[in-house]
Image: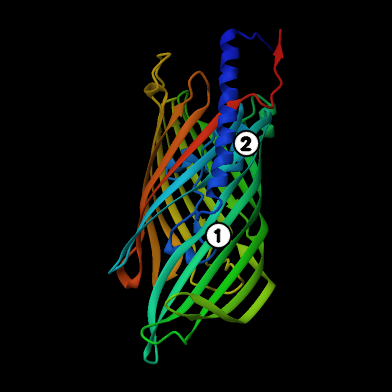
Amino acid sequence: MLFKISRQRLRMEENIKKYKVALLILCAMWVQFTQAQNITNSIYSRYGYGTEVFKGFAQNIALGGTGVAQKGPFHLNYNNPASNVALKLTAFNAGISANFTQQLNTTDTIVNKNGSFGYLAVGFPITKWWGLSFGIIPYSGVGYKVADTTTFGKREIVNTYKGSGGLNKLYIANGFNPFKIFSDSLMKGFAIGVNSEFTFGNTTNEEYKSFIGNDTSYYLNILNTKYQMMRGFSFLLGLQHTLNVNDETKITLGFSYGFKGNLNIDESINSERYFNTNLASSLVDTAYYSESNTVFAYLPSQYTFGFNVQMGPKVNYSVEYKVVNWGSDSISGVQSNLKNSRTIAAGLQYFPNSQSPDGILGHTYYRFGYKNTALPYYLNDTQILENAFTLGAGFPLRKAVSTVNIGMEIGRRGTTLANLVKENYFMINVGFTINDRWFIKTKYD
């Protein structure tokens, strides 16, 4: 098919190029700014590989984190690789996140905040029955500092625990529907996909035991440090099938299964002893040091299923259920204080689809959601729960298909009962989706 280039089309392409350059510069600056920052501030990140920090792209966050049954021609969807087959244009996604956390126990309240790189991904159609995407996303984050006091003889010891770091994922996702070759096929709405993922990162956990009180300058204080560098592969299989109920209503069923993955951990342990004075802390010696001890661990298997109902161009909603087998697939080959996590989530999207050529409100996607999660942490005979409300919007860029997506999550995890900590948190993600025909050959006359 031949396309004629008008002045309006040229102006649109120039605007898109400006968006691309600005977005790339923004991503580079943000990555440099956040390299030294913790990606999370949660006391529960002491356990396992840390807390989950990637909750989908901005539009998924606003919909309660749902996505296994969602697909679209202009947006990427990491939650199910089968959705890539629906892409009609190249989609470039990038996002940044900010978190605010209030931690409470029976006596203290602490407020933390941090910003971090969100995600970076690109997807495009290869044929009408094959779509491809790839990118880098955060997987888990470790960021905590907590202290308690114990007694040794007649002396008190302050035990300070601190951790930082986290894991990231490089992934490539393929979605296929060979039945699209046949226009009258009953399986035209079917799609299958697979994610190939490389997980990598490092964590540092410190335990500092310090004597306090009068005349403790000659007591030896101990700093134990464990540094872990991790890497491994895993795979996720996805399925989707869309049923046309009538001309206005479509139902998409979605399912994904993440296979148990292997993780190699290079671990070093260091134990140092210090003298503390009123002026400074001086190193006495290294009591123990072990370098490059290799540990074999696992990434847990998981499965998700759900459905999405599209009611014309204006309304669609999603419901899904997810299980991650942290308990049955023990991460180090031995049982720990982790249980299987379970999430029930729902999301609603409304698009006014105004017929007016102008007016941003009529062309904005409005999104709302809710989720309930039993987190994998099992402490003091209590499994930690998390509840959250989500909302957001997708704003179109002027004279372009591209959008700016905002996803917000307001939630609570944990409890002050059983000597535990309750965390109230607010998370906001700003994502940019730029669409163009980057890898599609166009003919001109």
Please, which residue is most extreme toward the front here?
Answer: 279
Q: Secondary structure at mark 1?
A: strand
The answer to whether any part of residue 143 appears in the image is yes
State which tag comes first along the sequence, 2 or 1.
Answer: 2
Please, which residue is most extreme toward the left here?
Answer: 107
- Quarter residue 242 falls in: top right
- Residue 324: % across, % down: 52, 58
Quarter of the picture containing the N terminus is top right
Front residue of 245/149: it is: 149
Q: Residues within 10 Å of mark 1 (few under 14, many from 20)?
A: many
| Residue found at x 35% / y 69% | 420
Quarter of the picture containing the C terminus is top right
Pointer 2: what residue? 122
Q: CA distance from mark 2 to mark 1?
A: 25 Å
- Residue 125: % across, % down: 66, 30
- Residue 363: % across, % down: 42, 23
Viewer-side label of 2, 1: 1
- Quarter residue 173 falls in: top right
Q: Looking at the picture, which amino acid does disc 1 mark?
A: Gly
Q: Is residue 400 above or below residue 266?
A: above
Front residue of 300/281: it is: 281
Tell whether 64 sits left or right of 70.
Answer: left
Q: Looking at the picture, which amino acid does disc 2 mark?
A: Val
The answer to whether any part of residue 76 appears in the image is no
Pointer 1: what residue? 165
- Residue 92: % across, % down: 59, 33
Q: Is residue 231 above or below residue 338?
A: above
Tell whether 359 sits left or right of 87.
Answer: left
